[in-house]
Amino acid sequence: MTNKIEFRDAVKSYPMNDSVFTALDGVSLEIADREFVTVVGPSGCGKSTLLNMAAGLDEPTTGEVLVDGARVHGPGPDRGVIFQQYALFPWLTVRRNVEFGLRIAGTSAEDRARRAQWAIDLVGLTEFADVLPKTLSGGMKQRCAIARAYAVSPQVLLMDEPFGALDALTRVQLQDQLLQTWAQEQRTVMFITHDVDEAVYLARRVVVMAARPGRIHTIIDVDLPYPRTEDVRLSADFSRIRNHVWHSVYHQEAPASAP
Ligand SMILES: Nc1ncnc2c1ncn2[C@@H]1O[C@H](COP(=O)(O)OP(=O)(O)OP(=O)(O)O)[C@@H](O)[C@H]1O
């Protein structure tokens, strides 16, 4: 399999008074085409910095970030980014918000309408397509932001704690929807979360980062079958991997135990 995203010895440092603060200290990571990777780690370990570099919203101080073998120089329609804070246009309806990215991409009106409707239906907002965001709950606003990214059908989805602010039930529903679209459209997904269960449920590999300086602590293979179902979530194998990831995140001073 070819690499879709590649971090090559990526360093991010910031000048700080008379010294330099190293936010990321030489991260090398290869994410294969169509792979689903989650990233977990303590606050401040550089997860968002890493994702923003792949998105083209931030640049490494030294090292390289490549997408499809080409150095990233800025955002592009091949990469959809979803943040925890849904940035919807308050004066546009759900449908117009979802169509926005397609409009920018120059998609024809007919395709725009079709793609938008598909994405709106997928996230369960069919009945709310023509209302303004202010009438939606937080979870519904986030569904709208997700539909907007899905509609453009980017090859790469970069998701920074997209479900972090949602209630547990909505979160589980959106995790399952995300896995369904991933299975259908076979995108490459890089997904940041603070939730160890979410990290394991979604991914083929979990990247555990460490802080001060930010770096990769360990990478844990999630050897569970897709499609992921409730049975998978409740299985002994899931618990075993979840415990391994948990230990790697919360007891980083100790060497990571074997699963
Ligand atoms: N513009 C900046 N100037 C100085 N330091 C910065 C800047 N942006 C980020 N940092 C620092 O870089 C480190 C990594 O930040 P980043 O947001 O990537 O961490 P994170 O793992 O995503 O954190 P969290 O889980 O809390 O969201 C932090 O210590 C942060 O304070």
Image: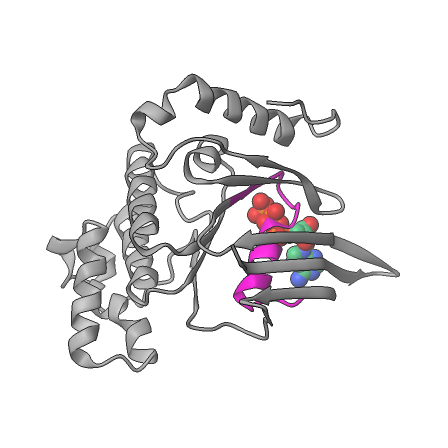
Residue 89, placed above or below residue 204: below
Res 91 seen here: no
Is residue 55 highlighted in magenta?
A: yes
**Hey, which residue is sitting farthest front in the picture?**
1
**Hey, which residue is sitting farthest left in the picture?**
127
* Number of residue marks: 0
Q: Quadrant of residue 114?
A: bottom left
Q: Is residue 135 left or right of residue 21?
A: left
Which residue is drawn at the image coordinates 60% and 53% (left, top)?
Answer: 30
Report the span colored magenta.
38-61
Which residue is drawn at the image coordinates 54% and 39% (left, top)?
Answer: 206
x then y, percent, for residue 200: 47, 33
Instruction: Between residue 24 and residue 222, name the one nearer to us.
Output: 222
x then y, percent, for residue 139: 29, 46
x then y, percent, for residue 171: 34, 38
Is residue 43 highlighted in magenta?
A: yes
Residue 179, placed above or below residue 24: above
Instruction: Between residue 184 and residue 23, name the one nearer to us.
Output: 184
Which image quarter is the C terminus in?
top right
Instruction: Between residue 218 and residue 174, name the one nearer to us.
Output: 218
Q: Quadrant of residue 78?
A: bottom left
Residue 48, placed above or below residue 42: below
Which residue is drawn at the image coordinates 22% and 81% (left, top)?
Answer: 108
Q: Is residue 74 left or right of residue 185?
A: right
**Hey, which residue is sitting farthest top in the picture?**
236
Q: Is residue 80 left or right of residue 213?
A: left
Q: How is the image coloured?
A: one colour
x then y, percent, for residue 28: 69, 53
Res 244 seen here: yes
Q: Quadrant of residue 51?
A: bottom right
